[in-house]
Image (cartoon, helix red, strand yellow):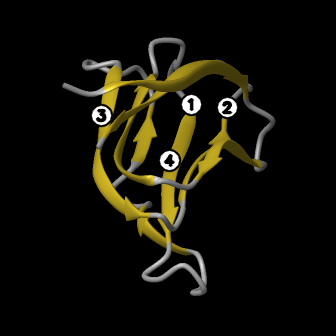
Amino acid sequence: MPSIESEGTQTATINTEHTLRDISGNKFYWALLDLVNMIAGDTVEIRVYTKAKSTGTSRMVYGPPDTTFSGVQDVPIQIIAAVPCPATQYKLTLKQTEGTGRNYDWSVLQQG
């Protein structure tokens, strides 16, 4: 069963990619984001980065357009799929590109 690795609230600054968590460890990581505060005219992008090997370059594995959300969310809690990180990197970011900066609750779950 996954457990909470970290959690918090991010106040978005428009067009700034905020790093919510940047960790390494031999685990699987998931992200949960609460988009309940979004209204019409708001757009947010969620990205997840990892490395193929420990000395490699960090690259996006999840991101826009698949993880772009706009307006009021019918399903406000979004779950970003598990990413295996064999002692490399898991980096979760949030970028609000339109609207008024909102508060976003988030958590990273781990298992392994």
Instruction: Tell me the amino acid under the disc marked 4.
Output: Ile
**Mark 3 = which residue?**
79
Q: Earlier in the sequence, mark 4 or mark 3?
A: 4
Q: Secondary structure at mark 4?
A: strand
Q: Position of residue 100 (x, y in %)?
A: 73, 25
Compared across the picture, whether 95 is left or right of 28 comes to right
Give the Cα separation between the discs numbered 1 and 3: 22 Å
Task: Report whether 52 appears left or right of 74.
Answer: right
- Pointer 1 residue: 41
**SS of the residue under disc 1:** loop
The three-letter amino acid code for the residue at tag 3 is Ile
Mark 4 Cα within 10 Å, few/some/many (few <14, many 20+)?
Answer: many
Q: Which residue is mark 2?
A: 99
Question: Dot 1: within a 10 Å radius of its alpha carbon, few (fewer than 14), some, or many (20 or more) residues?
Answer: few
Rendering coords of residue 70 (x, y %): 44, 36
The earlier-in-sequence mark between 1 and 3 is 1
For image coordinates 55% across by 55% down, the residue present is 24
Residue 81 or 17: which is nearer the viewer?
81
- Of the numbered discs 1 and 4, the one sitting upstream in the chain is 1
- On the image, numbered disc 4 is attached to which residue? 46
Sequence-wise, which precedes: disc 2 or disc 4? 4
Q: Is residue 74 left or right of residue 65?
A: left
